[in-house]
Amino acid sequence: MSAGQLPRWVDYGLIPLINLIAAFLVSGLVVLLIGENPIDAVRVLIWGALGFGEGVGFTLFYATNFIFTGLAVAVAFHAGLFNIGGEGQAYVGGLGVALACLALDRIVPWWVTLPVAVAGAAVMGAAWAFIPAWLQAKRGSHIVITTIMFNFISYSLMVYLLVNVLAKPGSMQPETRTFEEGGRLPFLNDIQSLVDFGTAPVNLALVLALIASALVWVIIWRTRLGYEIRSFGANATAAVYAGMSPARIIIITMLISGGLSGMMALNEIMGSQHRLLIEFVAGYGFVGIAVALMGRAHPVGIILAAILFGMLYQGGAELAFEMPAISRDMIIVIQGLVILFAGALENLFRPAIVRIFTPSRAPAVQAG
Amino acid sequence: MLDAYQTLILLLDSTLRLSTPLLLACLAGLYSERSGVVDIGLEGKMLGAAFGAGAVAYLTSNAWLGLLAGIGVAVGLALIHGFASITNRGNQIVSGVAINFLAAGLTVLLGQAWFSQGGRTPTLPQGGRFGEVILPGAEAVRDVPVLGPLYSELISGHNILVYLAFAAVPLTWWILFRTRFGLRLRAVGENPAAVDTAGISVVLLRYRAVVICGILTGVAGSYLSIAQSSGFIRDMTAGKGYIALAALIFAKWRPVNAMYACLLFGFLDAMAIRLQGKSIPMIGEVPVQVFQTLPYILTVILLAGFIGKAIPPKASGVPYLKERS
Amino acid sequence: MSETPAIELRGVNKSFGPVHANRNIDLLVGKGSIHGIIGENGAGKSTLMSILYGFYQADSGSIHVDGREVRIADSRQAIDLGIGMVHQHFMLVDPFTVLENVILGAEDGATLSGGTRKARQELRRLEQEYGLKVDPDAVVGDLPVGLQQRVEILKALYRGAEILILDEPTGVLTPAEADHLFKILEVLRDQGKTVLLITHKLREIMAITDTVSVMRRGEMVATLKTAETSMEELAEQMVGRSVLLHVEKTPADPMGTILEVEDLNVTDARGVRVVKDISFKVKAGEIVGIAGVSGNGQSELLEALAGIRKADSGRLSIRSETLDLATMDIDPALMREKGMGHVPEDRHRMGLINSFAEYENAVLGYHRSEKYAKGLLLDIAAIKQEAREAIEKYDIRPPSTDLRTANFSGGNQQKIVLAREIERDPDVLLVGQPTRGVDIGAIEFIHKRLIELRDEGKAILLVSVELDEIRSLADRILVMFDGAIVGEREAGADETELGLLMAGVQDQGAASGAVAGEKA
C-alpha cells in the first residue's frame, strides 16, 4: 500500500474522480429517496452554477472562500497536522480585516487599505492558530481537540465584541458599520468587461486567492521551509535525523495555515458584506477540509475542488429554487460524502487501484 | 432568603436538564474512546438521532418509537464510523467530521422534503413526547420547608431520559470496572496487541464499543427533540457534541468524573441563561459569553497540562494492524 | 526420549513477500525439557515462534502438539492447546493491575468478581509452586521490567500453559533478574512443563537448556544436546561458514585521532541505561568496527554521536573541537556542520523519506546548505545536477532523480544514502548496518567505497550485526554487549572468539563460567 508509485494522473486525477463518483452516486440515492430525479437535479445544478454569467460569478465567489480555507487545511496536512480550526481562524481573521477597514476606509482608497487588511487577516488568523500550535509543539496537547475548542472560543469572543464593542452605536444588530469605498474590494464586474457577473459579489479577493495558491505551491515545493514541512509530515523520525526542529515546524506551519484561513475573511468582509457581522464564516472553514482532501493537498487540486464546491453552493441554491424538495442542505450532504470517501474511506478503493497500476515491481524488501 | 433558595433550586433544576444530553453523549464518547476509537462525530450522531426521533415520534405519536428511531439513526452513523476507522483503518478524525457533515445536511434536507417546515419536524402530538415523571410523594412533600422543594422540584418532575442518563453513570462504571466486557474494552484502548494475543478479537470489541456509543448518542439526540423540546429543529445540537467531547477530556475518560464535568458544563449553561442581561452583585454584568466559553477554555487549560494531565487511552486514534514482531 | 514430543514441526515454511523467513523447518521438542533456539537476529526464530502461537500462519508444513496434528489459526487456539508465550515486547496493559492483566481473556464469566477471586487463589498457588511472587494489586506499569515479565509468565500459566515459549526473555533483564528467571524456568521444567527459550546469547543456552537448536538465515541447521556441545561449536553453527565476501584491502595506515568519545552514557525512554561508560578513539584512515548482537546499545550509541539522542554524560571530540553531549545543545545539524556524516541503521525509518523523490532525499539533512539556495528558494536544478552525478558515480539504478525512493531496491536506496553522506566530504563517517537488506552486488560496491574513503584519510565508525562484515572491513574491532564495550580485537580476529564476546561471555578464559559469573 505504501510502496508503489502511481502515475500522477492516477494519484491526482483518477483517485479523486472515483471518490467523487462514489460520493455523487450516494447523493443520487438521497435525491431518489426524496422523490426527485437525480439526473434532472444535476442538470439544474450545473446550469445554475455555470449556465449564466451571474451564476458563474457566485460560483467563483464561493470558490474564493474555499481556496483559502482549503489551502489552510492542506498546508497543515503537509506537516501531518490536522487543523480543524479554520472556522475560528477565519472568524478572528475577519476582525483583522474589519479593524483595518474601519480605521482606513474614510481616509484612503481601497488599494491602500488592502495590504493592511491582508496583514490584519493573516496576522489575526495566525494568532488564533498560534496557541493550539504552541500547545502541540511544547506540551503535546492534541491539536485537533484544541483547534475545535478554539473554534468555539472564537464564536463567543466575536459575538461579545460585535455586540458590546464593535456594534454601530445605537444599533441592536451585532455588526459593525458598513465600510465606505476605501474599505471595499472592487467587484470583478466593475474592473473587467469580458464576462458579465451580474450582481454576483465575486471580487478582487479571487485574485488574491490565486496568488495565495501560487505562493503556497512555491513555499511547499520550492523552499527549504516547505521541504522541512513535508519531511516532517512524511517521516518525523527522518526529519529529526536531518536536523530539523519539530516544534519550529509545527508552529510555523500552523501560523501559515491560520493566516490563510484568516484571509478568507477578505472575500466575505471586505469583498462582499462590507461590514463585520456575526457568523459570516458559515462553515466555510470546515468545507476547507473537504476541499483539501479532494484536491489532494495540492494548490491546483484545491483550486479545482474549490470551484467544484463553489458550483455546488451556487448550483445548490438554484436547485433549491427549482426543486424545493431539495434544499441547499444537499450540498452539505455531498460535502460529507466527499470527506467520507476521499478522506476516511481512502483505503476502500485505493489498494485495488494500486494493484492495477503497479503490476510487476516487487515491493522493496522490508525484512526485519 | 427563601427567594434565593428558590432561585438556586430552579438553577440546579435547569442544570440537570441541560446536563442530560451532555452526559449521555459524554458516556457515549467514553465507550468509543476507551476502546481506542476517537469520535468527534458525537455531534452528528446526536443530531441525526434528534431528527429521527422527532420524525418518528411525530408520525407515530409514540415517544418510545421515536427513541428507538433516534437510536437506530445514531447506531447507523456509528457503524459508518466503525467501518471507516476499524475495518478500513481510515483517519478517525476525518471520519468524524464526515459524520457531522452528513448529519447536518441530511437532517434538514430530509426534514424539508418530508415535512416542508424549513427542516423542522412538526410539533409533536400528545404521546410523542416524554413527559415529566412525578416521583411518589412529590406533591405531598412540596410544602415541607427546604427539603420539600428539593425533592419535588429538583429531583422529581424530570422526564424518564434524565433519570436514565444519570443511572447510566453507575451502570457504566460497573460495566467498565466490574465486567469482562469492560476489562477488555479498557485493555483494547490501551494495548490492542495484548488483547489480540490473549485470543480476543480487537475488531469485534471495537465494533461493540462503537455501537454502544451509537445507542447512547441516540438517546442523547432523542432527548433534545422529544423530551426537552417538542420536535426537531435545524442544528438543534448546537455544539453539544463538542462540549461532551470536552467534558470527556475534562473527566479524564472516567464515568463518575464525566458526570461531574457534565454537571459543571450544564451549570455554566444554566448560569448563562439565567444571568443574561442581569448583573451579579459585586461583579457587575458578566457577559454571557464568558459562561459559554468556560467549558472550552477549561478544557484547553487541562489539555495543556497546567491543571493535572489528561492522558487519553494510549491506543486511541490508532488503527490496529498486526505487526511483524 | 521415546515418549511423544511436546511439539513437532515438519517442513514449516513462511515467506513475507520475497523474504523467506522460515525454510523447511523441522523441530522436535521433548516434553518436560528446556529447549533452546539460538540464532542471530533475523535468523527466523521469532517468526517460527509466532507461527506456533498462531500470530502467523505457515505457508506449508505441519505442526504437532502432543503427537496430534493441529492447525493454529489464532492465539486463542494456541492458548487452548496449552501453549503460552512471553513476547519480547510484553503484551501487558500498563494501567491495569497484575490481576487484571492475568485474567484478561480468561475472565471466567461475564462479571469479574468470580474470576478475580479464582485468579487470586490461583496466583497464590503459582507463587508457592514456582516461586513467582508478585503483588496482584500492583499496577503493572509501575513494576520493574523483571516483574512485568513475571506477570507474563503468570498469564501463560494461569491459562494452563503446558508449553511456554519465551522470546529473548533476558534482553531487558539485569543479570540478577535473569538468574532468577532461569531458576523459575528450571522449576517449571521439573514440574513437567516444556519450555522453549529463544535467545541469541550462548551463555544462557549453555546454562539452562537441555537441548538446543540452531537457526541460521531461516533454516534449522542443527539440533544438539546441550551437554554434548560447546559454546565454540554453537557459535560456529550460528555464524556459519557463509561465503566470506572478499574485500580488497591493504592494511590500514592510520594517522592522528580524529574522533574521540569519552565516558558516554545514554538512558533510553524506558529509563534503562543502554550505553554504559563508553570511550574510544577513531583515527584518520581507519575503520573501527563495533560488533555485537543487535539491541546491545549500538543503535543508541550511534544516535547519541549523531546528535539525535540526548546523552546523560559524554564528550565527543572531532578534530580538535570538544563537545559536551550532555550539556550542550547538540542536534544533528550541528554535528553535520562539525564534519560528521551519518548513514543510519534503518534507512526506511530514518535515512530516507520514501514518499520523496530521489533528488529530494539526496539532500536530506543538507538542504539548508547555501549551495542549494537560490535567493529564498531551493535551487532544484543544482540539487538535481548533484543527484545525477551521485547516481552516476554510485551506479544507482534506475538512474532517475524523480522516482520516489520507495521504488528503488534496498541496495540502491542504501547507495543513495551513502552517496549523500560521503559526498559531503565528512571527516568522520558513522555507518550503521550498511548492507542490511542489500543485494550482493551492492554490498560489494558499498564495502569498496568505504575502504576507499578510509584510504582517503577519513575516520569511519562502522556498526554492524553482521560479523563477516565487521571482520572484512574493520581495522580494529570493539565488541559491545549490554551497553558496554567488552573487548577490543585487531582486524582478522578469530570469529569464534568474537562470537563468544558478542554472546556475553566475558573476556579471557571465563568462557565456561556460569550465568551468575557476572558481577553484581
Image (cartoon, rainbow, N blue to C red):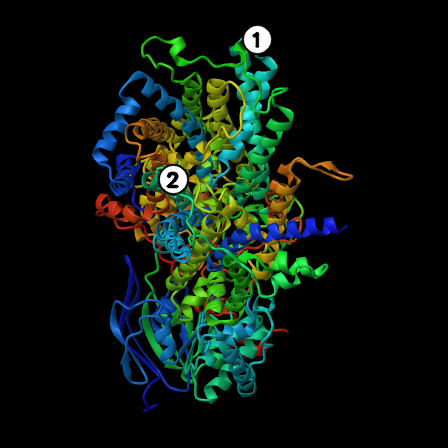
Q: Nearer the viewer, residue B45 or A213?
A: B45
Residue A34 on image: x %, y %: 28, 41
State whether residue C379 appears in this view.
no
Packing grade of label 1 (10 A; few <14, some 14-19, many >=20) is some
* C60 to B264, vertically: above or below: below
Q: Chain of mark 2?
A: B
Residue C21 on image: x %, y %: 32, 64
Q: Amino acid at mark 2?
A: Val
As drawn, the label of residue A108 is 1
Q: Nearer the viewer, residue B295 or C311?
A: B295
As drawn, the label of residue B108 is 2
Residue B201 on image: x %, y %: 38, 66
Quadrant containing the N terminus of chain C in the rendered view? bottom left
Identify the residue shown where x is 26% and y is 37%.
A14
SS state under label 2: helix
Q: Nearer the viewer, residue A304 or B25?
A: B25
* B230 to A181, vertically: above or below: below
Distance, label 1 to label 2, CA atoms, is 45 Å
Quadrant containing the C terminus of chain C in the rendered view? bottom right
